[in-house]
Amino acid sequence: MASVQPTTRPPPLFAKLLRLDNPIGSLTLAFWSWKVLLYIVVAACPGLGYDTSTSLISYAADPSTAQSLSGPLKFARWDSVYFLDIAEKGYLFEQEWAFGWGYTKLLSIFVSGIRLSGGDAGPASTAMVGVVLSHVAHYLSVLALYRLSANIFGHATATQHLICFLSAALHIISPAGAFLSAPYGESIVSLLNMTGFYLYSSSLIAERNGATRLRDIRVLTSAVLFAVATMVRSNGVLSGFLFAYDAAVLAWKILARGPTLHATVRLAVIIVSGCIVGSGIVIPQILAYRMYCMSRGDLRPWCEWTLPSIYGWVQSHYWDVGFLRYWTISNIPLFLLAAPMLAILCRSSLWALQSPSSSSTSPGSMLVRLAVPQGLLAVMAFTSYHVQIINRISSGYPLWYWYLVTSAVDLGSSSPKQSRTLVAAVYSMVAYALIQGVLFGSFLPPA
């Protein structure tokens, strides 16, 4: 009796597409599948939620929409209400300057374009622009992280490919969740940061290869991206630590060995780059100073500060942001909610600081450079921010993705390790993002 040969089943669609030999296609499929799921979760939430802010800005443009919010307006929640209103009308109230000038300016440019083309530029259209921008920026940020990971870990072997792929895949299901789909600045900052880090790491490769002109162009371009990120969210300025690190190393070498043309030019480029990043903080402050301190008879209190800062003033005066101000009994649940991400950020920063690097110009030394900005972000969130926002603003920092992935994938081995840390992180991020999507769509905290 002839033996029955087992039937070979063709692999399912996802198994064929999610392949390491087609990483960009696989990441694209995973990204848009996840985004569609999140969009459905948020859009399916019934009613206006407990807060009527979205309905109020919609009602101002069209009273018939007040009780029938749908589509992009379902993503107009929490801070995005301010972003959309400022994009349409400009900064009318002092407290609105807490919301990044760079992001509202970007939205307003698109709104102006819609108006010039004769289209409807109401709240729904502005929300649509914000949602599209966030989706596109997040997608490009995923690809930028993949390229950045290849610079750091290499891409010659299957294991290296796996590290790059998994790191980018984790960025897709970031705990930022719906905030990377809504009219918020987080996805823009993530794109700018990841691309800036990629260009900066590429400058280290150019330096190692002796391509000094290409190195300087990449350094200056990364500084411009970090400056724009800072205009969108102030924590973008932390990326300027990369230039502070290099300036300190070069200054020490010049003092120890004497100046050379190569070292002097590189130090000048780094100092200029640091100034460019700092301009991301300074430019919005100058605009606000001209508005409130040079064209008014009654000066606001912050106008008389030694270093006038409307951002510092409104965060403290209107939003009660400051050192240990958030440390209250009522906020304990929010600290518990942020605790896992704070722990991962701190642990991965220590992991990076302990990593060996062959030289200050090797891509591997990027781990050390990135440890301090990420660690500072975690400390500031714990002591001075509304701590729960760490779950979304951490999305633009690559180090913690690499830490989780390398807990399961070892560069020195061809087989993956058993990692409960990575598995637990993936399940937790997916569950958190879906629950958060329901809460976000219903206008319920935490925000």
Image (cartoon, rainbow, N blue to C red):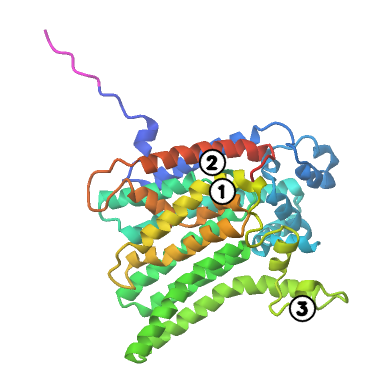
Residue 135 is marked as: 1
Mark 3–mark 2 distance (CA, rounded to whole Å)? 47 Å
Residue 304: numbered disc: 3
Q: What residue type is labelled 1?
A: His
Q: Which residue is drawn at 26% across and 56% down?
A: 156
Q: Quadrant of the N terminus?
A: top left
- The three-letter code of the residue at mark 2 reads Lys
Task: Give the answer, above or below, for where 177 lies relative to 93.
Answer: above
Say left or right for 107 vs 33: right
Q: Residue 11: tell me if it is visible.
A: yes
Is 119 rendered above or below residue 152?
above
Among numbered discs 1 and 3, the one appearing first in the sequence: 1
Q: Which of marks 3 and 2 is in front?
A: 3
Residue 381, position as x, y percentages in the image: 57, 57
At x 60%, y 34%, the residue is 41
Q: SS of the residue at dot 2?
A: helix
Quadrant of the rendered structure where residue 294 is?
Answer: bottom right
Report which residue position mark 2 lands on.
35
The part of the chain drawn in magenta is 1-7
For marks 3 and 2 on the same chain, the one whose residue lies earlier in the sequence: 2
Q: Residues within 10 Å of mark 2 (few under 14, many from 20)?
A: many
Is the residue under label 2 in contact with that under label 1 (CB below 8 Å)? yes
Estimate the spatial distance between the alpha carbons at disc 1 and disc 2, rounded to whole Å.
8 Å
